[in-house]
Image: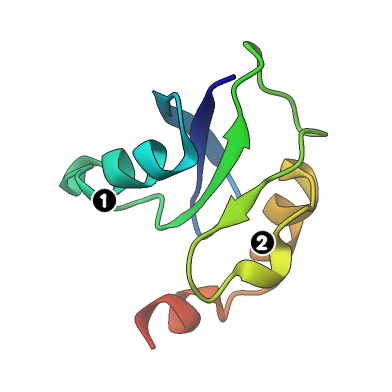
Amino acid sequence: MSYKAVLFSLDGEWTTDFRAKTIREVWNLVNDRGSRWFLYPIIGVIKDNGATWEKQRVIQMCNKFEHLEGKTIKTISNWIRDHPESEAIINA
């Protein structure tokens, strides 16, 4: 089994990257991602089943967003879009 990161922007858009064999390896890759990903500050980890779809559930979320673990990508995307204070949560 392998995993990958799902990266959310503050408007709820999302993309995936950083595939690895373990969840810990995904987080290590995310932590070294560099500034090209600054527009996608809210990050989670999903199983890498090949294709990614909105109904896929997120296994882990970054700090301060753990309450979204186990939710679908679509639900998290909508939550972020509907909560503009997410930027303040990140910067707190």
Residue 40 against residue 80 in the figure, above or below: above
Front in this rendered view, residue 80 or 44: 44
Q: Residue 84's image quarter?
A: bottom right
* SS label for mark 1: helix
Q: Residue at x 49, y 62 (%)?
A: 62
Disc 2 residue type?
A: Arg
Q: Residue at x 59, y 70 (%)?
A: 65
The first of marks 1 and 2 along the sequence is: 1
Residue located beneath label 1 in the image? 31
Image quadrant in which the C terminus is located: bottom left
Mark-to-mark CA distance, 1 and 2: 24 Å
Residue 1 against residue 81 in the figure, above or below: above
On the picture, is 6 further left or further right than 57?
left
Q: Residue 55, percent across and down?
A: 83, 34
Crowd class of label 1 (few under 14; some 14 to 19; many from 20; radius 10 Å): few
Residue located beneath label 2 in the image? 81
Q: Residue 19's image quarter?
A: top left
Q: Residue 26's image quarter?
A: top left
Q: Residue at x 48, y 40 (%)?
A: 23
